[in-house]
Amino acid sequence: MSRFTQLTTQLSAALLTGMMSMLAAAATPEQLLDGYRNQAGRAPQAAQGQTFFLTQHGGQWSCASCHGSRPSDEGKHASTGKLIRPLAPAANAQRFTDPQKVEKWFKRNCKDVLERECTAAEKADVLAWLLTVQP
């Protein structure tokens, strides 16, 4: 086997491995919801998720303060004014497809709104509701 063939084979294998890991990291909102359901040990409650999303929790903010009361529309950050793309997966196909990003934003936003991290049940409830929201 020539050196060129060896390098081409190695490069192809590396690219294939990289693509497979990217696909393994990809998720669907439904897969994430299943994970939160399993962690919470109970079925998600979409109505509770809607209430949670719209309610101020201890401080002056709710999830809706930045994401808007209609998460199928664009929101705007309450203090910076930065535009936020729609949160509902039906209005923004990129939402809830990267588990690391989902966890990062849940952690940050829950600390802003609740002054603590969200529980798996709270995440499940909110995501269950967001999956029902249509544009």
Image (cartoon, rainbow, N blue to C red):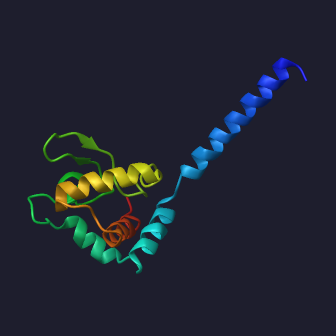
Give the residue displayed 43% in from the left and 55% down from the top.
96
- In the rendered image, residue 81, in percent from the top left (x then y), is placed at 17, 40
Q: Is residue 61 above or below residue 18?
A: below
Q: Nearer the viewer, residue 75 or 102?
A: 102
Q: Quadrant of the N terminus?
A: top right
Q: Identify the residue at horizontal 27%, vertical 59% (top origin).
A: 70
Outermost residue on the right side: it is: 1
Question: Residue 106: percent from the left, percent from the top?
Answer: 31, 56
Which residue is rendered at x = 51% and y = 64% of the image? 31
User: Which quadrant of the structure image shows residue 113?
Assistant: bottom left
**What number of labels is visible?**
0
> Which residue appears farthest toward the top when viewing the image?
3
State whether residue 9 is above or below residue 95.
above
Residue furthest to the bottom in view is 42
Looking at the rendering, which quadrant does residue 71 occupy?
bottom left
Residue 111, image quadrant? bottom left
Residue 90 in percent (x, y) is at 43, 58
- Left/right of residue 79 with respect to residue 50 in the rendered view: left
Could you tell me which quadrant the C terminus lies in? Answer: bottom left
**For the point 45% across and 48% down, which residue is it?**
94
